[in-house]
């Protein structure tokens, strides 16, 4: 929707707005000539601008355009207009997530469990570090902790690296070093994965679900979106560096399965999951891979610096390489999904 709106604001004619890819299932034309449709493969969607050769916004094989057609053609807009139009897609994903988080925090509340340790598991990383029940975690590696949920976010990102903990005990502030253990954990959806853990728990209750005022809800929503972005970027970086396994990568099968599991937890949980997916989709689209929005932004950035676009042959090679990368990634994550399902079947 971000692409569509900013394109319209910049005078670009939109030929197609599709939810999904592949053959059209149902659709209609609006008064501006845009074809709105739902397609067979629910793996995202695309917007096709006037003058595009395909859904990746590659330039069409040039038929001669009239002066009036050039005024509404995407590729005849300035490089900065094209950058704004392309960037609007991932930005809309992020804005959508922030709006969802803000509404939920204002209408239903945000978990705000005090960061006070209720229990320390024997032989755990926390026990080795000297943490005790009753300790309040003040900071982790300099990051101030106000909710236990923030600790649950930061510790897995360490991927087993040592953490500096600032702890309040009996009115005194202590500094302790803890090295999380990598263990198999099972989340609320029954998903099992390896994760860095300290081995502590906190006492939570319904009173820890705090409804926020409008301003606080928006601030908390921005913070949550930033935390998800940070977690995704760090995790991907660790995978690329070989510091984290790729078993957590999931494709359409896993997303569909998790969506069903989350839906059983209730409407609010499903909304939160949708916002989580929206953040991740926006970040994936910003990867500098031709075919994705990030690849287009890379080409347009080069054009802005050089004062002219890359030649068509270079762009064509780029799109081919990008498409090959995307196809390979889709095959890999789908294989991951199948292997996971087989393991679950054999273990069940």
Image (cartoon, helix red, strand yellow):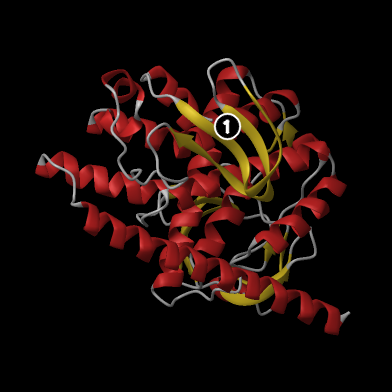
Give coordinates of residue 273: x percent, y percent. Answer: 69, 45
Q: Residue lying furthest bottom in this view?
A: 346
Q: What residue did someone put label 1 on? A: 96
Q: Quadrant of residue 128?
A: bottom right
Quick check: 18 above or below 331? above
Locate the N terminus and report the quarter of the image it occupies.
top right
Q: Secondary structure at mark 1?
A: helix
How crowded pointer 1 is (Cα within 10 Å; few <14, some 14-19, many 20+) is rated as some
Give coordinates of residue 185: x percent, y percent. Answer: 71, 70
Give coordinates of residue 190: x percent, y percent. Answer: 80, 65
Q: Residue at (54%, 48%) from the top-left corner?
A: 281
Give coordinates of residue 117: x percent, y percent. Answer: 67, 56
Q: Is residue 145 visible?
A: no
Relative to 22, is 7 on the left or the right? Answer: left
Q: Quadrant of residue 18?
A: top right
Q: Residue lying furthest left in this view?
A: 306
């Amino acid at each position: 929707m971000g692409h569509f709106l900013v394109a319209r604001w910049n005078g670009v004619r939109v030929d197609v707005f599709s939810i999904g890819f592949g053959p059209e299932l149902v659709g209609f034309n609006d008064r501006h000539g845009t074809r709105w449709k739902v397609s067979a493969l629910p793996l995202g969607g695309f917007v096709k601008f006037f003058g595009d050769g395909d859904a990746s916004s590659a330039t069409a094989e040039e038929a001669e355009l009239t002066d009036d057609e050039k005024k509404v053609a995407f590729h005849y807009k300035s490089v900065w207009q094209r950058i704004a139009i392309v960037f609007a897609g991932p930005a809309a994903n992020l804005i959508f997530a922030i709006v969802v988080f803000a509404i939920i925090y204002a209408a239903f509340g945000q978990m705000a469990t005090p960061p006070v340790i209720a229990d320390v598991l024997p032989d755990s990383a926390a026990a080795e570090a000297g943490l005790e029940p009753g300790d309040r975690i003040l900071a982790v590696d300099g990051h101030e902790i106000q909710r236990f949920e923030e600790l649950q976010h930061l510790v897995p990102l360490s991927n087993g690296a040592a953490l500096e903990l600032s702890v309040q005990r009996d009115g005194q502030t202590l500094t302790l070093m803890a090295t999380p253990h990598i263990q198999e954990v099972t989340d609320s959806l029954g998903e099992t994965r390896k994760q860095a853990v300290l081995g502590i728990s906190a006492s939570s209750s319904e009173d820890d679900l705090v409804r926020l005022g409008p301003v606080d809800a928006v601030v908390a929503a921005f913070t949550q979106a930033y935390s998800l972005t940070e977690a995704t970027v760090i995790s991907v970086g660790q995978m690329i560096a070989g510091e984290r396994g790729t078993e957590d990568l999931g494709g359409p099968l896993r997303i569909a399965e998790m969506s069903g599991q989350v839906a059983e937890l209730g409407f609010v949980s499903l909304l939160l999951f949708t916002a989580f997916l929206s953040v991740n989709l926006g970040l994936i689209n910003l990867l500098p891979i031709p075919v994705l929005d990030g690849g287009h932004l890379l080409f347009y950035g080069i054009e802005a610096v050089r004062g002219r676009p890359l030649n068509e042959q270079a762009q064509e090679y780029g799109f081919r390489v990008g498409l090959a990368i995307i196809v390979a990634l889709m095959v890999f994550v789908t294989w991951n999904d199948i292997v996971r399902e087989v393991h679950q079947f054999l273990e069940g």
